């Protein structure tokens, strides 16, 4: 079976920016290109017969600002749930969203690379976005998603997929917009955006504030503390009770562009947030999380220096800061404490009571500067060459205060008060200060070797100061069979770098790091078709097969209550994705996708747990009057399995949303109203086994939104 | 990285038959101008693209009429000529494309004039299609643009050559 699937790779196709419904004609394809892309299409002047070369060598989805508004999404995770084969779940401990591509999932979502305007914004700490970071959508112009590997261009962690958020530029905003939104659960947002020209620069600026109290009905009947209460006779648990899902954020973007230059600045501030289900799975209404994220980004590119060469320099600096004060266990908890001061469920322990709770304050600061030099050469007939070299530094400093654990208590005192001991700059901190450097080089050629045929082949080398070097090639063969049909055959190898937490976690009661980890690797094969039978219908279909080696997983330490990260286990997966878009009438459009996947854990020979086997999305859009539209949409998730021995049911669910929207009413006013999860579907996310319950998702809600352009 | 970005925002193969690609690229530029140029407000219910004189696009450009500029549908007009005493006075052209070397004789305060013959920009046209380095690029006469009420985005100028008048 595997051999067959290796041959039947898959790739897929994509939503175009504009031409989605009309793409039967070639000229329509050109309409979707930017001026820079048009200017890059080689034409053979000698014969006067222009020959375009295409570049697409991946499986991509593009969701535009217009589509985001039509679906009524207000946060990025709602947008990404509509992408074929992508399901949004929850990470462990932080309960941040995680983006599961094609059944590939781990605790921190480090198998997905996030970019902002093409710049890496995932952190080395856990290979994920900064804790508590959730993009509001108002500043987003479009979201580009690669389903499949991208390491041959983007390096580490472009493993299961790549998500690139593109913000609005001056022309996208063109003037000033101010808007407000208000809805259930004290949900409120306000934003202002401005796009204009200043001293030869196109300038775009935006600022958005968001607040919600969270759904008070997301309650759990039992939590981790309940388990200890039952075992030890204490009564500390705050369950039944609601998750603490309130948050308050500020998000700002600034962009300046002129000939040769593109300058960006981004700031995100999680001013205040709850700890959701609690850092240790025990409800924690006192806990608070905050963060600050800053990204500076500069690009210079020129085609004026050398004939046939485009030369670019890209530099960026990402600075993130997270601070969390939380109660791992609530007031009056009684816990088994080992001689190292940590909670210990086996071996030799003593019962210790914590009348003021088990408390900690964790902080970390990460700095990630990077530099890339890029050259594109178009001097050879039918070839487009890409060569680049890059450098990145990743550094982290940690701080910690707590009233438990090594260096603080040793289990000999039966009562521990709430006062915190600072273990920052001691050997007892949760992670030693860590840094590493990454050097990289890329070579790629796009070869238009025959009419209607394009071969893209490339390879990237990364050298990490901690684990060493890795080479990741890719190849893509694209054939335009005729005006209606395009087909692609794709191969790519990708890697995920072990992150700082997996390498260096220490004094943790559960997870211990390992300095000898190797990267995870994945080989992916895809075969994709794009079929446009008429001007109003576009369909896309793909099948894929992948093999993951050296998965980094926590493995239980013999005779201990801890687990240590090890390269352990392989995963195979195959599946298919189908997309459709049918504009059958000027006023009606039907779009959607269905994905089926089968991901197998080779160690257990069982399906990978907690990931959906079926993922269906469909939306019907009705355009009425001149400027109004109504869009109902359905998202259905099915076939998630639990790990062996876990008998908590994990039901399939479907959510339905309905969004009404009016654009440029009276020339300036935009209005929308959205009903989310209309039927109040009881959707749940699976959690780590020690939590007694699945976590409920938000129930039915609504909002109203108005904005003015001037 | 920059180039990688360009690679992947281009999801569709654009390999087409040879003869008309030049004009498909030019048609796509014309469509792009609607996104990168700002016109002063006017009451026209449609966005008007006027092809003056000889029409090298033939029917190839017609699909542009399925698209809109903001909320205004794009309409293609084929006119024998445009000047201040136009034979078609009810049409206000937002873009005037001319395949002749001289720009149309209009007080082009609110029309973007586009041409493809050599010296179109030198003669006072705003944007000229030029072939350079094996590609179709843009030559922009900034002085002509500045005299008008149009605003051209820096992003468009980034891929363009700028025509500079050598004043004696």
Image: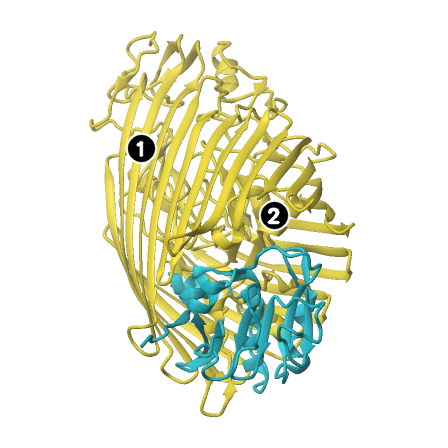
The chain under label 1 reads A
Residue at x-position 59% and y-position 23%: A220
Q: Is residue A566 left or right of residue A579?
A: left
Residue at x-position 72% and y-position 46%: A631
Q: Colour of chain B?
A: cyan
SS at circle 2? helix
Q: Residue furthest bottom?
A: A47
Q: Quadrant of residue A403?
A: top left
Residue A574 appears at what percent x and percent y? 57, 59
Q: Which residue is mark 1?
A: A364
- In the rendered image, what is the letter of the chain coloured yellow? A
Q: Quadrant of residue A310?
A: bottom left
Q: Quadrant of the C terminus of chain A?
A: top right
The chain under label 2 reads A
Q: Which residue is mark 2?
A: A68
Query: Distance from label 1 to label 2 (Cα)?
Result: 33 Å
Residue A531 in view (yes/no): no
Q: Quadrant of the N terminus of chain A?
A: bottom right
SS at circle 1? strand
Residue B65 appears at what percent x and percent y? 69, 68
Q: Quadrant of residue A699?
A: top right
User: From what the image shows, is residue A76 above or below residue A386?
Assistant: above
* Discs 1/2, front: 2
Q: How is the image coloured?
A: by chain
Q: Residue furthest front?
A: B85
User: From what the image shows, is residue A249 above or below residue A413?
Assistant: below
Residue at x-position 62% and y-position 43%: A640
């Amino acid at each position: 079976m595997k051999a067959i699937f290796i041959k039947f790779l898959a790739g897929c196709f994509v939503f175009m920016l504009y031409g989605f419904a009309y793409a039967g004609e070639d000229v329509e394809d050109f309409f979707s290109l930017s001026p820079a892309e048009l200017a890059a299409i080689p034409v053979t002047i000698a014969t006067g017969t222009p020959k375009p070369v295409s570049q697409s060598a991946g499986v991509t989805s593009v969701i535009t600002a217009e589509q985001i508004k039509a679906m009524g999404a207000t946060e990025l995770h709602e947008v990404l749930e509509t992408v074929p084969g992508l399901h949004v779940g929850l990470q462990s401990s932080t309960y941040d969203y995680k983006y599961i591509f094609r059944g590939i999932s781990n605790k921190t979502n480090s198998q997905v690379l996030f970019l902002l305007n093409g710049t890496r914004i995932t952190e080395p700490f856990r290979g994920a976005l900064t804790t508590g970071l959730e993009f509001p959508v108002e500043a987003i112009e479009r979201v580009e998603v690669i389903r499949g590997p991208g390491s041959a261009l983007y390096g580490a962690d472009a493993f299961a997929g790549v998500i690139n958020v593109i913000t609005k530029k001056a022309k996208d905003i063109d003037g000033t917009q101010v808007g407000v939104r208000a809805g259930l659960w004290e949900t409120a947002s306000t934003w202002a955006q401005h796009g204009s020209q200043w001293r030869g620069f196109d300038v775009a600026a935006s600022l958005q504030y968001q607040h919600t109290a969270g759904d008070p009905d997301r309650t759990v009947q039992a939590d981790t503390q309940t388990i200890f209460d039952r075992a030890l006779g204490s009564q500390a648990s705050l369950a039944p009770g609601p998750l603490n899902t309130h948050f308050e954020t500020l998000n700002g973007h600034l962009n300046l562009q002129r000939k040769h230059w593109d300058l960006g600045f981004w700031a995100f501030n999680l001013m205040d947030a709850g700890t959701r289900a609690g850092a240790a799975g025990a409800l924690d209404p006192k806990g608070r999380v905050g963060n600050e994220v800053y990204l500076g980004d500069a690009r210079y590119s020129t085609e004026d220096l050398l004939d046939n060469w485009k030369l670019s320099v890209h530099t960026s600096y990402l600075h993130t800061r997270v601070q969390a004060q939380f109660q791992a266990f609530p007031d009056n908890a009684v816990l088994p404490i080992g001689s190292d001061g940590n909670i210990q469920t086996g071996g030799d322990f003593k019962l210790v009571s914590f009348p003021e709770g088990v408390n900690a304050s964790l902080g970390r600061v990460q700095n990630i500067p990077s530099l890339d030099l890029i050259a594109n050469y178009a001097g050879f007939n039918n070839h487009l060459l890409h060569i680049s070299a890059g450098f990145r530094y990743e550094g982290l400093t940690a701080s910690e205060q707590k009233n438990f654990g090594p260096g603080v208590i040793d289990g000999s005192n039966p009562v521990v008060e709430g006062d915190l001991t600072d273990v920052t700059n001691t050997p007892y901190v949760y992670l030693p200060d860590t840094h590493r450097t990454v050097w990289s080089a890329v070579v790629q050629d796009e070869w238009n070797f025959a009419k209607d045929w394009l071969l893209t082949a490339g390879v990237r080398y990364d050298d990490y100061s901690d684990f060493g070097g890795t080479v990741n090639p890719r190849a893509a063969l694209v054939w335009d069979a005729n005006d209606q049909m395009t087909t692609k055959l794709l191969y790519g190898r990708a890697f995920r770098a072990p992150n700082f937490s997996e390498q260096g976690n220490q004094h943790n009661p559960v997870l211990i790091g390992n300095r000898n980890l190797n990267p995870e690797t994945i080989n992916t094969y895809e075969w994709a078709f794009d079929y446009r039978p008429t001007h109003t219908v576009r369909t896309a279909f793909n099948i894929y097969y992948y093999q993951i080696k050296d998965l980094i997983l926590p493995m239980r330490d013999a005779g201990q209550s801890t687990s240590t990260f090890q390269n352990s286990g392989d995963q195979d997966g195959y599946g298919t994705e189908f997309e459709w878009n049918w504009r059958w009438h000027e006023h009606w459009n039907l779009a959607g996708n269905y994905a089926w996947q089968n991901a197998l854990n080779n160690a257990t020979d069982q399906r990978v747990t907690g990931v959906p086997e079926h993922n269906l999305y469909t939306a019907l859009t009705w355009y009425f009057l001149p400027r109004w539209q109504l869009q109902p949409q359905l998202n259905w998730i099915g076939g998630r399995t639990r790990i062996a021995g876990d008998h908590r049911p994990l039901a399939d669910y479907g959510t339905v949303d309905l969004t009404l929207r009016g654009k440029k009413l009276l020339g300036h006013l935009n209005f929308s109203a959205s009903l989310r999860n209309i039927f109040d579907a009881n959707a749940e996310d699976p959690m780590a086994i020690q939590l007694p319950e699945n976590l409920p998702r938000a129930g039915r809600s609504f909002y109203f939104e108005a904005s003015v352009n001037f | 990285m920059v180039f990688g970005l360009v690679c992947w925002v281009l999801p569709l193969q654009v390999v087409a038959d040879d003869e008309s690609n030049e004009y498909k690229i030019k048609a796509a530029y014309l469509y792009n101008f609607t996104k990168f140029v700002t016109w002063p407000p006017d009451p026209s219910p449609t966005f008007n693209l006027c092809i003056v004189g000889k029409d090298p696009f033939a029917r190839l450009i017609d699909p542009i009429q399925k698209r809109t500029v903001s909320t205004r549908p794009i309409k293609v007009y084929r006119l024998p000529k445009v000047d201040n005493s136009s034979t078609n006075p009810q049409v206000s052209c937002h873009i005037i494309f001319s395949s002749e070397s001289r720009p149309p004789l209009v007080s082009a305060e609110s029309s973007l004039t586009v041409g493809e013959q050599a010296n179109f920009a030198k003669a006072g046209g705003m944007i000229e299609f030029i072939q350079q380095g094996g590609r179709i690029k843009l030559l922009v006469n900034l002085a002509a643009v500045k005299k008008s009420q149009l605003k051209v985005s820096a992003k468009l100028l980034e891929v363009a050559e700028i025509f500079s008048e050598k004043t004696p």
